[in-house]
Image (spheres, rainbow, N blue to C red):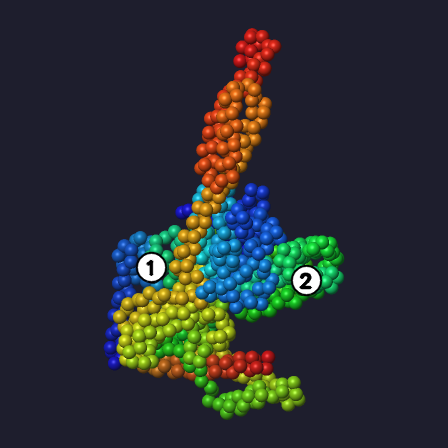
Amino acid sequence: MDHSHTHTTGRRELQMARSMCWHCQSEVSGEYFCERCVKVQPVSKEADYFTCLGFPRRLTIDLQKLEAKFYELSRAFHPDFYQTKSETEQAISLSNAATLNTAYRTLRDPIQRAEYLVAIEAGAVKEIRSSPPADLFEEILELQETLEEFRASDQSSESGQQLRTQLQKEQHRLEQRKQEMETQLERLFVEWDALQDRGEATSESRAERDRLLKHMREILSNRTYVKNIVNDLVATIG
Amino acid sequence: MARIVGIDLGTTNSLVAYMKEGVPTVIPGREGRAMVPSVVAMTDNGLIVGDSAKEHLTRNPARTVYSIKRFMGKGLADVQSELAYFPYSLTEQGGVIRIKLGEKSYSPPQISAMILKELKQRAEAHLGESITKAVITVPAYFNDSQRQATKDAGLIAGLEVVRIINEPTAASLAYGLQEKTQGTIAVYDLGGGTFDISILKLKDGIFEVLATNGDTHLGGDDIDRRVADLLLSDIRTAFGVDLLAYPDHMQAVRLEAERAKIRLSESQKTEVAIDLPEGKGQFSRELTRDQLESLTADIIERTLAPCRFALKDAGLAPEGIDEVVLVGGSTRMPLVRQRVQALFGKQPHCHLNPDEVVALGAAVQADILTGGTTDMLLLDVTPLSLGIETMGGVMSSLIRRNTTIPASAKEMFTTYVDGQTGVDIHILQGERELVKDNRSLARFRLKVPPLPAGVPRIEVTFLIDANGILNVKASDMRTGQSQSIEVKPSYGLSDNEVERMIEDSFKFAQEDVSARKLIEARLDAGALIATTEKSLAEGGTLIAEKDAAEVRNALSALNAAKEGQDPKVIRARMAELEQAAKPLSVAMLDDSLKRSLHGKKVSDVTKAR
């Protein structure tokens, strides 16, 4: 099972390395412009967003550098500069620019960046579902009840006001919790990057990798859950 | 590459501009004015556009169309509340509004096309070359249907719309070119009918839009309407006359309200005067700036919420904005400037001509597309979230608002029933949870091979291009085959309809040409008749009576032809008259020569030679 997986990945890399320029058929290996005929090349469907923007798979990214790269590639791909070119080039430019924009939007935000990395490391771009943090389960159930009560109550009455104050407190607590989770994530990001930088291929490092991914996935999914509840609260109590 | 002009197709006025040796320049008309009023009138002599059409607003209100931009990409139900204000008659056909002018009905893109044609001709006359390509601006908050309608208008006018760009971002290009600033700017654009706010980051020639917001139904028109309502109620109280029953007077009130508003941007008070119908005399009153402001403060206030939303989406506080740029004629109002200054905490930049800056920016974008300007690049966003209808009438968002365009999203579809051969997809735009609260853009049916439920895998790609217009593609993941999709727009013209309107517009163009030929032939005939009659009166005695009779016969023949409809016949009779009048002109020439030589010596004459 494990063996066949490595095998397909290997073949895919081989294909990428040997891809040909759509125009002059000379060899191109990941460059955006053919070295011989200078025509724009489509961004490979296999390339992840990190590769697309020329960054290593790390969770700490220099945003200044990321922006500079995004601007540089926008100048290379944007349809504005392909208006006088052939239809094929226009189509490549459009699709490359759309991919570039998605890549930049994803990597620019630390949470989206981590969610994306966790997903591609798992081998498939699977959506990270939101799930409540185990220790908050009961508290959140209670909160939902209070919210229902508040929605049904006369909000200007004294009891309505009391419920609102209670909910505001809950909102504050949850926001704090979300903040804590983000701090926790940042620490995991640093650990992840350090592990990658070491580049070891031992069984310990593989176990460490799996542990980090699992932990990040869990916090990310809890964070999304808490974020949604906070949004719900803000929308209801204003 | 052929030249591309930049066009600002405005609610109240439109302009065309081009890049002249690196400087964006607006193209004036024959009278030197750059602005063409966005007004189209159907007269007995055909359709007219611009300044001359504006004169028909009060003379022939039912057949004079203004503010057509408000109806672009809309259905009749969208504009129900304001129908009473428009003197022309609106109906609907296939989800698209139609305006009845005389015998025929026109869609808003057709009316807009007439304005575009006027601008096209103006540019052609000025530049001495045929113009076939244009960049046209739209409000940033225009949805897909409204953008598509604008593109259709271009096609009908014989223009390839190379790019649709947003008005505030166009303005930022002109601003950036002139001021060479870096940093974060907010463009506040309050025009005749629409409001936009865009927040941009300017850095090393890149104009990156961070967020945009707005209201496509908020502008100077609404302010004029408030003033007009005040005048109408005053007149009702003082004279017992309801001008709503007099469309021509209604237009006079609307125009006077607009003029008074404009005057109050300069002075503190002004006199307003309206002629009343049925010899009831004239109504007049004084209007102060304070009165105008208390009357319209809530309208101006409505522009501030979108500004706050845009700031929030851009992740910025008002202090994060380095400069506020004002665009659109309505930003001349002192109250607008005050409110903007209060919100952003800094004095707005108003060194640009708010009427022209959008067209100038469109010209800059046109120059970028032709490869003239290479150091500037605009990265714009889609103003509204795009999604599809899912179970329970809920919208599932695929591309969020303020996503940089081009933007794409892929979605996998499958079947729920064995042998199912199609999946219906409903595309929506908007920020609300429920389908019914969002704008329906289009529907289409995905073709699926008949297989057990869940087996087919069709990937649909939704792509918003650099114009902010949606393109949809589908491919069967099992076979790798792509399928073409026929999207039926909810509020737009189908491709066939646009095709037919383009043909119609060529037909009209021919009718227009023959109408012009007739008018010119009549004018020329009139001039020839006048000079011949004059000659006949002066020199009729110099020629034989037979020759004089022939001239008189040819004259009456031409007079008769001039009343007819055929320019060719007129030209033929003119040629005959010129032929018949030859002896007369020869005799008159001889006579004048003789008289001028009279009393001179032969030697003087030769010397003079």
Q: Is residue A148 above or below residue A50?
A: below
Q: Which mark is residue B334?
A: none
Q: Nearer the viewer, residue B553 or B332?
A: B553
Mark 2, Cα crowd under 10 Å, few <14 / some 14-19 / many 20+, is some
| Type of amino acid at the residue the image marks with label 2 | Asp
Q: Which residue is mark 1?
A: A41
At 33% from the left edge and 78% from the top edge, which residue is drawn?
Answer: B415
Residue A69 placement (x, y as % from top left): 43, 62
Q: Tell me the distance, in whole angstroms, between the alpha carbons under discs 1 and 2.
A: 68 Å
Q: Is residue B48 above or below residue A90?
A: above
Q: Chain of mark 1?
A: A
Q: Nearer the viewer, mark 1 or mark 2?
A: 2
Residue B191 visible in the snapshot: no
Q: Nearer the viewer, residue B458 or B447?
A: B447
Q: Chain of mark 2?
A: B
Residue B504 placement (x, y as % from top left): 43, 52
At 75% from the left edge and 61% from the top edge, which residue is drawn?
Answer: B238
Quick one: SS at disc 1? loop
| Type of amino acid at the residue the image marks with label 1 | Gln
Quick one: SS at disc 2? loop
Residue B18 placement (x, y as % from top left): 50, 47
Q: Looking at the rendering, which quadrant does residue B308 occupy?
A: bottom right
Judged left or right of residue A154, residue A115 is left
At 41% from the left edge and 56% from the top edge, which residue is drawn?
Answer: B500
Q: Nearer the viewer, residue A88 or A124?
A: A88
Determine if marks 1 and 2 fall on one subunit.
no
Mark 1, Cα crowd under 10 Å, few <14 / some 14-19 / many 20+, is many
Q: Which residue is mark 2?
A: B242
